[in-house]
Image (cartoon, rainbow, N blue to C red):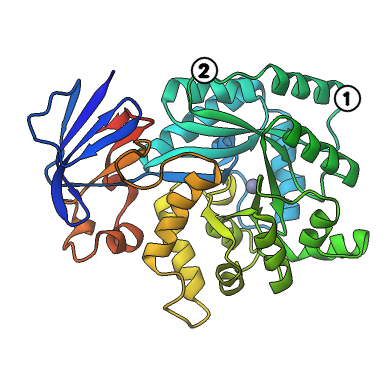
Amino acid sequence: MDSILIKNVLHKDAKTNIFIEGNRIKAIGVPSDKNASQVIEADGKAILPAFYNTHTHAAMNLLRGYADDMPLQEWLTEWIWPFEDKMTAEDVEKGTALAAEEMIKGGTVFFNDMYFAPERIADVVARTGIRSAIGITVMDNHSLAEREVKAKFIRDWKDTTGRMMLTVAPHAIYTVGTERLKEAALQARENGLKLHIHVSETAQEVKDCIAAHGMTPVRYLDSIGFLGPDVIAAHCVHVDAEEWDILAERGVTVSHCPCSNMKLGSGRFPYELAIKSGVRITLGTDGASSNNNLDMREEMKFAALLAKVDGDPSILPASMVFKWATQNGAEAFGIDAGVIEEGKIADCILLNLNDVQMRPLHNLISNWVYSAQSSSVDAVICNGKLIYGK
Ligand SMILES: [Zn+2]
């Protein structure tokens, strides 16, 4: 079995040697001469869990800088969708490859994607060593033939890497009608897949939902039986206290995307209500055209700062937002990782502590959230394999 020995690495305030065997952290505190198929000298480096990006559209890296500084509806309908109509499966593969490279170099080992050409995305995931939940997108404007191709893809799907899963991904309540939302939920549940959807991203979406269905988006989704512990709801910016309780009760995971919400002027995530409700909160970058990068370290800092902007600097401390970006993301997708502990799957990063933004080292997590740059990521291990190293 393949193994990695990480020598002299800083882990919880002390230097130690960590032994990875197969895809798991086998032992922490082994002798420095332990036999391993690969040895990483990590003096001057710290080990931390890697990032799980729980909402993105990876291939949108091709649209970076293409349409900035406008509201969501105009941005989507006049710029993004017309561009995407011209994209081929090959374009999706190229965009996803760019995104995977960017994410890996920034310490991300997993992305929850929503796009098209899933077979091409799977190719990129297989060859780069990253993990992904690949969304099979549902929109009302898909033809019957397209829907049949997608259903067949789900039926025939087999992951041979141990790093991929599919999700059923109805885009949003304003692009997918009630019947198709119900069908998507049924299709996901029959196939044991998670559901991935944009929810209450803008005030307009809430207003339109009330006009169409007489209730807000979370209540509407609950009324049609859509919500459950298998649902990943992206954004949830305009969600009231009672709706947060509904999300918590149904066990929904929320993917908070602070950069995208700020850039599109969608609003401030209601941190106070979300945290109080006990909902599992994770972080996502959204696509590169509304961010404009896929840097999860930046996402942690923006979330922590946006939380505090209304006057309470104690809300969302560094340790909490770090947990959102790591452990909570892994848990949401049933990946037995997200912490550096014996027995856990080895999804981890090594950080260069000699970088100027990392010094002095009063508090590693504080540095990682507030002062570091993602270029301090020196090595990335995903599923027990070194997939990036400087
Ligand atoms: Zn999105």
Question: Residue 75, percent across and down?
Answer: 70, 50
Q: Residue at x 72, y 62 (%)?
A: 202
Residue 241, by quadrant, is: bottom right
Q: Which is in the foreground here, disc 1 or disc 2?
A: 2
* Quadrant of the image containing the N terminus: top left
Badge 1 crowding class, 10 Å Cα cut-off, few under 14, some 14 to 19, many 20 or more, is few
Q: Earlier along the polypeptide chain: callout 1 or callout 2?
A: 1
Q: Nearer the viewer, residue 19 or 254?
A: 19
Q: Secondary structure at mark 2?
A: loop
Q: Secondary structure at mark 1?
A: helix
Horizontally, is 93 left or right of 222 in the view?
Answer: left
Question: Residue 327, percent across and down?
Answer: 44, 50
Q: Look at the picture and state if 382 lies above or below 302.
A: above
Q: Nearer the viewer, residue 324 or 99?
A: 324
Horizontally, is 314 left or right of 143 in the view?
Answer: left
Q: Which amino acid lies under the numbered mark 2 shown in the image of this protein?
A: Thr
Badge 2 crowding class, 10 Å Cα cut-off, few under 14, some 14 to 19, many 20 or more, is few
Residue topped by disc 1: 144
Question: Residue 236, percent across and down?
Answer: 66, 60
Q: From where the camera sits, is residue 293 visible? A: no
Q: CA distance from mark 1 to mark 2?
A: 29 Å
Q: Nearer the viewer, residue 119 or 157?
A: 157
Residue 160 is tagged as: 2
Q: Residue at x 53, y 33 (%)?
A: 132
Residue 30, by quadrant, is: top left
Horizontally, is 154 left or right of 13 in the view?
Answer: right
Q: Residue at x 56, y 55 (%)?
A: 257
Q: Residue at x 60, y 18 (%)?
A: 158
Residue 213 is tagged as: none
Question: Residue 128, percent across and down?
Answer: 42, 25
